[in-house]
Image (tube, rainbow, N blue to C red):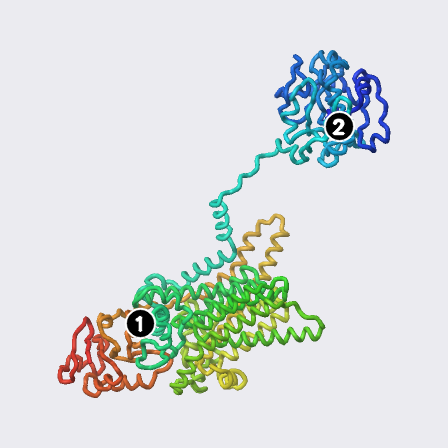
């Protein structure tokens, strides 16, 4: 242990072990011989002089005595006292003699105590050689070379006389070893926890090898703070949940859900009784989800042979199927559950669209606020308000989400380019899976997406091999990534073929169902449609009433994506985080998709829509070119995201440079203004009419049955009512009307008469339900109460309907 230097507070090395004569001379004040060079080299410490051994009396007297009484030497009564700290402490010497105090044990041995050292005048008496025999024996331990070499605490004095304290080249004696002097057991109980000393000398100076002393870290263990207790499983689980809840994607998902509820309100106000926009097409789509869920649980092989349009085949493929929502259709039964299911999926479709576009913008390199602008503008563009009754059009969130996953898996972004180290085949598999799910929701939106993916694969392959030929080096890609693309692409193509097969069968059985270029011309919007908002827009609906009146079919021709979005995208051409070539590519994409969305209105579609209509399989089934505005909106959103991200980055730099930074919060809040404006422009006034209640006769009538009156609109209600048990019904509504259903509607105008009864019996119809509330102004208004006994059928009033059993 080091001895405190009086007056300076600096530590000096305790003199190491020497022979008995040297120590006696030192104690009596006789100068010791200087250490030889060979001794220093061999690890022996030079003998201290009298000046270094005995501090001045005044200095020793000024040193404070330890409060706990744990001195290194004997007490005034001569009784040994154990140390409480486990290390060698300084003892106060006698101020009168000037010899007391400093411990004379070597630093290597922890400064073994002087056998007769005391803190009073007895120090002079105890310093005789006769009484120092124990001390001499302890000091002889440090004299052995084996101790100096084996013990890592051997003192190596520095130039200024201060020993090293880093625990590597010799501590100052803080590690205490066994002392054999008068203080019996004084240093053994605390300093010898790990075993015997490295070298314990006998009276002849021979060293015996013992157990190793504790290392440097163990010496200070007694002074270390208590280790932090290991958290319990509950604590760790709570922390994990907390990290999950504040993660960006958790907040983005919750934000998208909350925004969807607000922006579609009051969809969830009466979710079991109302439908958004109208109750015709939504009723059809509510039935589609219910049928797919029901039949996949009951009889999957009959999926495409639905209970409607009896006795037609492949009737489930008469329109887009929303087959991807079949898992939701497995929950609940009956019309009210079908309406509730539809409203929930309606809200979730908006949330997924927001989240998908946000994820794509983030993956491409946009900031959080910029990505939020892209997500909100994509999901709540004003033109989509006219599509509120078409869930298969609103269910487009899988498109940007799949693109984001595929880009993430391939390590590519618009802002940073290709980064091979960020490749991950798991994201590629997920991207292809989401793409296949999006395709299963319907070809009206999914078919252009499928062709886009095919073009992207071809362009990527061409660029890959072109770069390889130009540079002579292969761009890192990897077999695992190639396998993921191969398997994922095959799965996507397989889903597409399985979905397309029933539609090809419908075209084969009903060739008149295939659309012509004349049909496309009816729904092709003019250029003015890109600046005209639908009537459901809260901001622009009333202002654009005159412009809508000039459009031939305004529900499919009001294609305004938002004036705020136009402005942000225009700004993104000049001020953006995207590179110039990327901005130009995005602009080209906007113009090209607009030209395709115009159908035959852009130079008669000769160079745009018509070639696709004539040569691409399945493209002729798309009767509304204006829905391609979806891609225009997405590209405009990406341009806007680049501009908003550049703005937020600039604001961050300005706030970091300002001193004081008090405008910082206000500037950051100002960056939310584009997001707020985009959201406000998407506010709607969409009506939510109450769905007609299911007639009680529908629950008791035996199928196959026919519900009269029958037309495109009323038959969609009948499809929804048939979700109670799914009886076979002749009624049905879709994108086209089968000729057989036309014949049924024509013949049944005279029901009940013999001709109509015989015809319905030929088809296999067993019941006819005539709704009293719908017969006003129809032929049944007169015949509904006519007797039917002569026709061989029965008649029964059930609630507000009349049931005829054939």
Marks 2 and 1 sit apart, C-alpha to C-alpha, by 100 Å
Residue 31: give x, y in percent of width and height. Answer: 84, 19
x, y percent for residue 256 = 46, 60
Q: Name the element at disc 2.
A: strand
The residue closer to the viewer here, 687 or 622, is 622
Residue 680 picture location, percent across and down: 45, 63
Q: Which residue is mark 2?
A: 207
Verify CB contact (< 8 Å) between mark 2 and mark 1.
no
Q: Along the line of sight, which residue is nearer the eye, 26 or 258?
A: 26
Give how far across and how far down residue 773 sits, in percent: 22, 74
Residue at 77% in and 26% down:
206
User: Camera-side residue: 348 or 176?
Assistant: 176
Residue beneath disc 1? 720
Question: Considering only vertical position in the picture, is 237 above or below 512?
Answer: above
Q: Quadrant of the C terminus?
A: bottom left
Position of the N terminus by quadrant: top right
Circle 1: element type? helix
Look at the picture and state if 772 lies above or below 191. Answer: below
């Amino acid at each position: 242990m080091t001895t405190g230097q009086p007056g300076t507070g600096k530590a000096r090395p305790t003199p190491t072990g020497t022979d008995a004569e040297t120590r006696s001379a030192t104690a009596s004040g006789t100068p010791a011989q200087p250490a030889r060079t060979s001794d220093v080299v061999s690890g022996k410490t030079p003998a201290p002089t009298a000046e270094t051994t005995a501090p001045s009396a005044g200095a020793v007297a000024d040193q404070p005595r330890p409060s706990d009484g744990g001195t290194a030497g004997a007490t005034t009564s001569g009784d040994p006292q154990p140390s409480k700290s486990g290390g060698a402490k300084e003892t106060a010497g006698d101020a009168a003699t000037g010899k007391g105090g400093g411990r004379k044990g070597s630093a290597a041995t922890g400064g073994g105590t002087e056998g007769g050292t005391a803190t009073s005048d007895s120090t002079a008496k105890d310093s005789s050689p006769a009484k120092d025999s124990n001390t001499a024996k302890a000091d002889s331990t440090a004299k052995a070379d084996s101790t100096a070499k084996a013990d890592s605490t051997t003192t190596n004095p520095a130039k200024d006389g201060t020993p090293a304290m880093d625990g590597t080249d010799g501590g100052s004696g803080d590690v205490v070893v066994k002392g054999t002097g008068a203080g019996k057991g004084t240093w053994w109980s605390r300093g010898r926890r790990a075993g015997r000393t490295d070298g314990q000398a006998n009276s002849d100076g021979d060293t015996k090898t013992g157990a190793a002393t504790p290392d440097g870290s163990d010496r200070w263990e007694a002074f270390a703070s208590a280790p932090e207790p290991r958290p319990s499983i509950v604590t760790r689980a709570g922390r994990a949940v907390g990290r999950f809840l504040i993660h960006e994607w958790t907040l983005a998902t919750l934000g998208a859900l909350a925004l969807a509820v607000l922006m579609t309100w009051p969809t969830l106000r009466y979710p079991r009784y109302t439908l958004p926009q109208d109750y015709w097409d939504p009723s059809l789509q509510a039935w589609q989800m219910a049928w797919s869920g029901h039949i996949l649980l009951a009889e999957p092989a009959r999926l495409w042979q639905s209970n409607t349009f009896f006795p037609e085949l492949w009737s489930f493929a008469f329109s887009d199927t929303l087959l991807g929502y079949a898992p939701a259709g497995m929950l609940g039964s009956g019309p009210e559950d079908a309406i509730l299911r539809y409203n929930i999926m309606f809200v979730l479709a908006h949330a997924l669209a927001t989240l998908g576009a946000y994820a794509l913008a983030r993956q491409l390199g946009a900031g959080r606020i910029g990505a939020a602008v892209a997500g909100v503008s994509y999901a709540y563009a004003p033109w989509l308000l006219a599509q509120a009754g078409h869930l298969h059009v609103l269910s487009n969130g899988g498109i940007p989400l799949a693109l984001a996953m595929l880009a993430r898996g391939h390590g590519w972004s618009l802002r940073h380019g290709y980064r091979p180290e960020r490749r991950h085949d798991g994201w590629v598999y997920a991207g292809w899976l989401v793409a296949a799910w999006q395709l299963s929701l319907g070809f009206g939106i999914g078919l252009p997406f499928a062709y886009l993916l095919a073009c992207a694969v071809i362009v990527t392959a061409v660029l890959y091999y072109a770069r390889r030929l130009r540079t002579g080096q292969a761009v890192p890609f990897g077999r695992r990534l190639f396998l993921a693309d191969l398997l994922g692409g095959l799965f996507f193509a397989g889903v597409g073929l399985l979905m397309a097969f029933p539609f090809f069968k419908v075209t084969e059985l009903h060739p008149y169902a295939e659309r012509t270029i004349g049909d496309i011309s009816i729904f092709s919007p003019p250029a003015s449609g890109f600046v005209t908002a639908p009537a459901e827009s809260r901001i622009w609906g009333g202002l654009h009433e005159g412009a809508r009146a000039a459009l031939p079919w305004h529900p499919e021709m009001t294609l305004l994506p938002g004036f705020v979005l136009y402005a942000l995208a225009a700004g993104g051409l000049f001020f953006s985080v995207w590179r110039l070539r990327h901005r130009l590519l995005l602009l080209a994409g906007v113009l090209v998709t607009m030209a395709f969305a115009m159908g035959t209105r852009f130079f008669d579609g000769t160079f745009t829509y018509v070639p696709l209509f004539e040569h691409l399989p399945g493209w002729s089934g798309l009767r509304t070119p204006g829905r391609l505005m979806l891609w225009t909106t997405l590209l405009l959103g990406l341009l806007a995201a680049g501009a908003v991200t550049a703005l937020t980055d600039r604001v961050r730099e300005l706030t970091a440079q300002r001193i004081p930074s008090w405008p910082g919060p206000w500037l950051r809040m100002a960056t939310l203004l584009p997001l707020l404006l985009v959201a406000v422009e998407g506010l709607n006034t969409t009506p939510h009419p109450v769905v007609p209640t299911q007639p009680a006769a529908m629950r008791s009538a035996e199928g196959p049955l026919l519900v009269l009156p029958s037309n495109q609109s009323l038959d969609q209600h009948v499809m929804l009512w048939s979700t109670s048990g799914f009886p076979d019904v002749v009624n049905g509504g879709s994108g086209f009307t089968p000729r057989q259903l036309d014949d049924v509607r024509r013949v049944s105008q005279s029901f009940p008469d013999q001709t109509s009864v015989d015809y319905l019996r030929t088809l296999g119809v067993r019941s006819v339900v005539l709704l009293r509330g719908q017969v006003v102004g129809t032929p049944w208004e007169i015949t509904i109460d006519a007797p039917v006994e002569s026709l061989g059928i029965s008649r029964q009033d059930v609630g507000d309907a009349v049931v005829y059993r054939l």
